[in-house]
Structure formats: C-alpha cells, structure tokens
Amino acid sequence: MEVPCIDLAAGYLELKPELDKAVKRVLASGSYVLGENVDAFEAEFAGWLGAAAAAAVGSGTDAIYLTLKALEIGAGDEVITVSHTAVNTAMAVLKAGATPVFVDIDPETFGMDPRLLEAAVTGSTRAIMPVHLYGHPVDMDPVAKFADDHGLAVIEDCAQAHGAFYRGRAAGTIGKAGCFSFYPTKNLGACGDGGAVVTNDPELAARIRSLANCGQDRDSRERRRNIFRGDVSRLDELQAAILRVKLRRLSLQISRRREIASFYRRELSAAVALPVEKDWARHCYHLYVIRSKERDRLKKHLAAAGVEALVHYPAPAHRQPAYARLARGPLPTTEAAAAEVLSLPVFPQLQEAQLDRVAAAVASFHPAA
Ligand SMILES: *Cc1c(COP(=O)(O)O)cnc(C)c1O
C-alpha cells in the first residue's frame, strides 16, 4: 500500500537517535524492572495530563482491570460501559469478575449516550466506564452527575484518548481514574505492551502499583511485604524509557494529527460523512473515522487506489462469540456504527503527497445510491 493506515516504523525513524540512546542506556544499566525510568515516566505522564499521580502497568487492559480491583469492584458487581469499543474494555471488566452492561452510543461522537444510563442502572451497578473512542471525549458532565447521584465511580477508558480534552480538562482526569494503553498503535505507543492509570487520588495510584507488582508495598520493596494478593503487570524499564522519549514529542504529534484532520475536513466534506468534533471537545484523532452506507465497497475502492483503510470495529463486543452472553437490550446505534465506520490513515509522519492520494481516492468513489 502506498498509504498505510498506520506506519509504526516511521514513528521510530523520526526519533531514532534519541530512542536508540535511551534503549542502550537501559540495557547497560542492568535495571530492567521497577527502575528509575518507570518512576520518572509516571511523574512525567501525570504531569503532562495535569493529574496528581500515575501508576504504570503492563497494558491498557490491566489498567482497567487493576483499577476495578483496587476499588474492590468484582464478582456480583456491574459496570456500565459500551459495546462499540475494542473488546478489551469488556474483557478487563470480566477479568475483574464484574459484569459489563452495555448502553448504546451517540451517533455523532461514537461515545456512551448519557441519557441511557438511567435504564441500565441496577442495585448491583458500581461504576460507569465511558470510552473516549477514536479520541473524541464522551459528554462527561451528565455522566459525572449521574454517577454522583447514584454513588458510582467513573472510570475513563482513555486507551484512544491521549491528548483529548473535554471542556478544557484532559480526558483521564475527570473521573476517579483514567486508564491508558501504550499498545504500539496508540497515540503514545511503546514498542510492546504497556499501560497506566492516572488519578488525582495518590492512594489509589499506590494501591494499583502494589497490585501490579505481586501486591508488594512498593514503598518498602526491600522488605517484600505483601499487602494485597496481587498480579504481575509491570511496565518494564525499556518501555518506560521509550515512552519518556516519545512523550516529549506527543503534544506536537497530536497537533499534526489535528492538521491532518483539518486537511481531510477541507478536502472530503463533499464526499463522505466525516467525524464530528463537538464544540466542547478537543479531538486527538487517534483514528479518523468516516461513515458510509457502502463501507465495504469504499474500503475496496481505496485499497485499489493504494490507500489502506481499516474497520474499528467490524463487530461490537456483544456480537463476538466469546461475549455474546452479555447481549441484553437492542443497541441499534452501535450495530449501525459497526456496519458503516471506516478509518482513514492518520499518523503524524504522513506526507503531503500521501494525504493528496487519500483525498483523490475518496473523491473518486461513486456511491451506488
Ligand atoms: C487498546 C484499547 C484497550 C486495551 O489496551 P491494551 O494495551 O491493548 O491492553 C482498551 N480499550 C480501548 C478502547 C482500546 O482501544
């Protein structure tokens, strides 16, 4: 493909000298887990978001799972979330022993529709987990108000929302905790798996750090005191060192993503349904998702023109064989989105000629209807 949907090697080449140096330094240090890079990254990432604390963990899935565990949300408890998301959202809730309860989404933002919370809440509900999908924040004020009124925790799935803002506040700093992924394709991606929980509650962060490290009290590591029955889900020093280099460039890269989105808005608005950015939102364009009733035909047309477009996600969680038992009421907006969404290439290293090629390929598609 002349224009891949994402090019991770280009992301490496852009920062090669700094990344190579950081990796070599870790290799030579002999300190590979729970070292200075993890501590420094936690502080730097929390600072970048304007949060009090961050706890680095092994993946975005575990960021969600360990947050639930730290809040003692598990067997018999329900967590209201959405089905139109990476399956990891539901998987992490199940891993904690709790049950995900799906509500439908807003057709414009692809995020949780807060008006549907009332019908989903039960005596077993403990938390609400909005997913800031594609990088557009969920309308958080009504979610937070509903949670307050019902005594529920708000846990934000921020795996796609590094650099998204809701009414001037960074996604991940609005609820009790924000769960981030550093899977390689994310806006801030490691060269392997990684995740972090961001919170304004330093005690919660400490509990998550402990749970991620065998339940040991990290502040008294030498004594190997197990204060919880924990897991092994640590961010390692190599990934932390890589993430520290990339974090320094992240704000610029998100600006570049937004420039690409502006270009698409200018060039494509006549041809297809483009992503919406609400006036209360700052989209970080993790994915640039258009809609088409002829999605599959458009995807093939683009491929023939050398443009790779991907579908995020072809089936909602409750349509996956492993999670079908979670299906309850109908989710018509979720189902429609799964049939129509298409992600165009958006990554900071895209060249102007590649962008022109995407625009031309989309413009030359002739809808049947
Ligand atoms: C990627 C992703 C996750 C999980 O992150 P991992 O690091 O892959 O475990 C969770 N939720 C959403 C919405 C994601 O996109």
Image (spheres, rainbow, N blue to C red):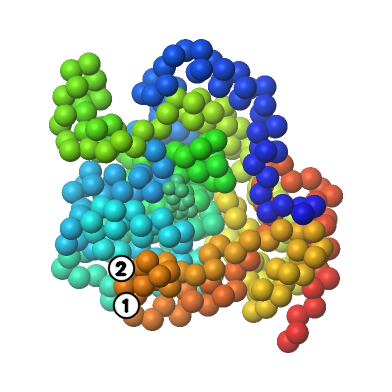
For disc 1, the marked residue is: 328
Query: For the view shown, which residue lies furthest in the front direction?
Result: 321
**Crowd class of label 2 (few under 14; some 14 to 19; many from 20; radius 10 Å):** many
Is there any visible trace of residue 13 in the rendered image?
A: yes
Query: Measuring 40% from the left and 70% from the top, which residue is drawn there?
Result: 321
Q: Amino acid at mark 1?
A: Arg
Q: Nearer the viewer, residue 270 or 96?
A: 96
Question: Measured along the vertical axis of the image, is residue 336 above or below residue 91?
Answer: below
Q: Image point 51% across, 17% down: which residue?
A: 27
Q: CA distance from mark 1 to mark 2?
A: 8 Å
**Residue drawn where x is 82% and y is 57% of the image:** 357
Q: Position of residue 1 (x, y in %)?
A: 77, 54
Q: Relative to 71, is 132 above or below?
A: below
Q: Disc 1, disc 2: CB below 8 Å?
A: yes
Image coordinates of residue 175 in percent, x first then y, are: 33, 50
* Quadrant in which the C terminus is drawn: bottom right
In which quadrant of the rendered view does residue 89 lie? bottom left
Please state which amino acid type lies under the numbered disc 2: Val
Q: Is residue 217 left or right of residue 352?
A: left
Q: Where's residue 135, x and y in %?
A: 53, 54
- List x then y, in percent, for residue 151: 19, 58
Q: Secondary structure at mark 2?
A: strand
| Residue that numbered label 2 is attached to | 101
Q: Is residue 266 left or right of residue 42?
A: right
